[in-house]
């Protein structure tokens, strides 16, 4: 039995010098979950029902987001367990809009416990939606790195470092990390506060590797989906996040995936920071832009079916040579809509970013995120089709949209399910599975 497994809930709640007894949590969040002693047995069998997903996957897209890659500084499994317990507790507080935590009776030194920029009273506007992911380096293994925590044997089978695809200009300092956090909020300051709070409270165990800030597409830009910075409705043929059957088919890990049992109900996440060369794009004619994308900028309809609603089903059978929709158009390569292509679909949840200039040009683009059951079959297969199709029927060379895109960071992650019960902490299933 591990020391962290022996901690009682009460011991754990006070172990960090913080009593949660007086924190008013929303009813939906229930009792603070942290550190109740799990039974001291061998790894748990697969649950009959997979645990629920973490927030930030199928929940509505928030206004502002910070995506952060973090390095784990501790070096033993026990310290990692302690770190995840504490992280779970802080995430719980942030989800409850903990801006007023500094006013807790047991936290008299306010400067040390709250940076203050959101004020000192809990407020729903300060609530954060936090999603945690694990990177391949947390596990280690052949071609990955050292197995620092003895987790290599329970690594999700498809979790590797993110490879470089044709056209990528990946900055290693902004690519892959031990842990990943998506912090969603109603305002950019709240999202930043969440990251700052976690770094301050858990700086003994975590260090920032990279952080990307993003915002939702302008909601007033029209239907059926808001428009991204290139001016096109983005999300028109995304998977419906509100459809549990579609999510089970394409997103949540199932027993058939033959992943370690702790992965059931979780999902793989691909993050790509894609700079868009907006000045170059803005010099193009509307017609050329439509050929690059394969849909009409004006209303989001397919070039092949401009009189049908943008969401109406269609395929490219009537245009095998790409006379109407070029074979190199983004949407045609991304989803050629042939029998079998359905298997590579995934859930997109992307944000725009703009961080100022990069040497006299705009540094703006897309924080692309894709959730799926199998990276190789879904994201990677799609990405290969976009950049270098191995099927001659899809044309040769990369999609022409790539002339305007520079992917420069991100990573491959595994997003574990939410804790199965209020007594568990986020990530506990992984540690139990490791024994
Ligand atoms: C900055 C980069 C990108 C931009 C601006 C962009 C934009 C768009 C737009 C405007 C659409 C059409 C509307 C829709 O169905 O959502 C679309 C569709 C799609 N994109 Fe992208 N995208 C980008 C990167 C990617 C990447 C990296 C992938 C995957 C490797 C991808 C996969 C898809 C897929 C699967 C579709 C749906 C196609 C369909 O089912 O018809 N996109 N994208």
Image (cartoon, rainbow, N blue to C red):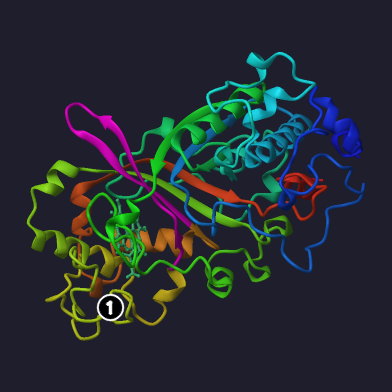
Quadrant of the image where one finds ligand 1: bottom left
Q: Is residue 289 visible?
A: yes
Q: Image quadrant for the N terminus? A: top right
Instruction: Note whether 103 is above or below 411 in the view shown.
Output: above
> Which residue is pictured at 18% across the width and 81% down the height?
319
Please say if 188 is above or below 239. above
Q: Regarding mark 1 in the picture, which secondary structure is present there?
A: loop
* Mark 1: C-beta under 8 Å from nearest atom of ligand 1: no
Residue 261 in picture, x, y percent from top left: 73, 59
How many discs appear? 1
Tell me: 231 left or right of 73: left
Span colored in magenta = 345-370
The answer to which quarter of the image holds residue 18 is top right
Q: Is residue 406 left or right of residue 125?
A: left
The residue drawn where x is 73% and y is 42% is: 25
Please rate how many residues cluster around mark 1, counting C-alpha atoms within 10 Å: few if below 14, some from 14 to 19, many from 20.
few
Residue 350 x %, y % = 40, 52
- Where is mark 1, residue-wise? 309
Q: What x and y, as percent, mark residue 80? A: 72, 33
The overriding secondary structure of the stretch rendered in magenta is strand
Q: Is residue 144 visible?
A: no
Residue 79 is one of the magenta-drawn residues: no
Q: Residue 99: which quarter of the image? A: top right
> Eyeballing the image, is 316 above or below 226?
below
Give the camera-side residue of 291 and 91.
91
On whether residue 363 falls in the magenta region, the answer is yes
Q: Residue at x 31, y 56 (%)?
A: 220
Measured from the top left, where is residue 270 in percent x and y? Answer: 47, 51
The part of the image, by quadrant, that contains residue 285 is bottom left
Above or below, 200 against 157 in this view is: above
Please tell me which residue lies in front, 1 or 86. Answer: 86
State the residue in front, 122 or 423. 122
């Amino acid at each position: 039995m591990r020391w962290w497994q022996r901690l009682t809930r009460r011991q754990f709640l006070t172990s960090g010098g913080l009593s949660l007894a007086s924190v008013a949590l929303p009813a939906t969040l229930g009792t603070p979950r942290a550190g109740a002693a799990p039974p001291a047995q061998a790894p748990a069998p697969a649950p009959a029902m997979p645990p629920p997903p973490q927030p930030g996957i199928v929940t509505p897209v928030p206004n502002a987001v910070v995506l952060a890659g973090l390095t784990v500084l501790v070096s033993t499994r026990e310290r990692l367990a302690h770190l995840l317990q504490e992280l779970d507790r802080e995430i719980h507080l942030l989800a409850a809009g903990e801006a007023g935590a500094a006013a807790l009776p047991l936290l008299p030194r306010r400067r040390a416990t709250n940076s203050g920029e959101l004020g000192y009273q809990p407020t729903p506007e300060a609530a954060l939606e936090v999603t945690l992911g694990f990177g391949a380096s947390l596990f280690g293994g052949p071609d990955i790195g050292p197995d620092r925590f003895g987790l290599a044997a329970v690594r999700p089978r498809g979790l590797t470092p993110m490879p470089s695809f044709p056209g990528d200009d990946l900055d290693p300092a902004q690519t892959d990390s031990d842990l990943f956090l998506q912090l969603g909020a109603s305002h950019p300051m709240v999202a930043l506060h969440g990251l700052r709070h976690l770094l301050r409270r858990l700086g003994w165990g975590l260090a920032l590797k990279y952080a990307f800030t993003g915002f939702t597409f302008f909601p007033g830009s029209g239907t059926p989906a808001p428009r991204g910075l290139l001016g096109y409705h983005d999300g028109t043929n995304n998977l419906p996040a509100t459809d549990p059957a579609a999510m089970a088919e394409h997103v949540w890990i199932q027993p058939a995936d033959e992943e370690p049992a702790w992965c059931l109900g979780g999902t793989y996440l691909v993050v790509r920071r894609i700079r868009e060369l907006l000045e170059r794009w803005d010099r193009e004619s509307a017609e050329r832009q439509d050929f690059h994308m394969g849909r009409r900028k004006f209303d989001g309809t397919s070039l092949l079916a401009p009189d049908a609603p943008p969401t109406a089903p269609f395929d490219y059978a009537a245009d095998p040579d790409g006379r109407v929709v070029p074979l190199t158009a983004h949407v045609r390569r991304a989803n050629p809509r042939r029998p079998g292509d359905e298997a590579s679909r995934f859930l997109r949840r992307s944000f725009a970013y703009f961080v100022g200039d990069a040497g006299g040009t705009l540094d703006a683009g897309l924080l692309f995120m894709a959730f799926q059951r199998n990276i190789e079959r879904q994201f990677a297969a799609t990405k290969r089709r976009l950049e270098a199709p191995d099927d001659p029927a899809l044309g040769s060379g990369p999609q022409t949209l790539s002339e305007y895109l520079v992917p420069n960071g991100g990573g491959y992650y595994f997003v574990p399910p939410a804790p199965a019960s209020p007594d568990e902490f986020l990530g506990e299933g992984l540690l139990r599975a490791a024994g």
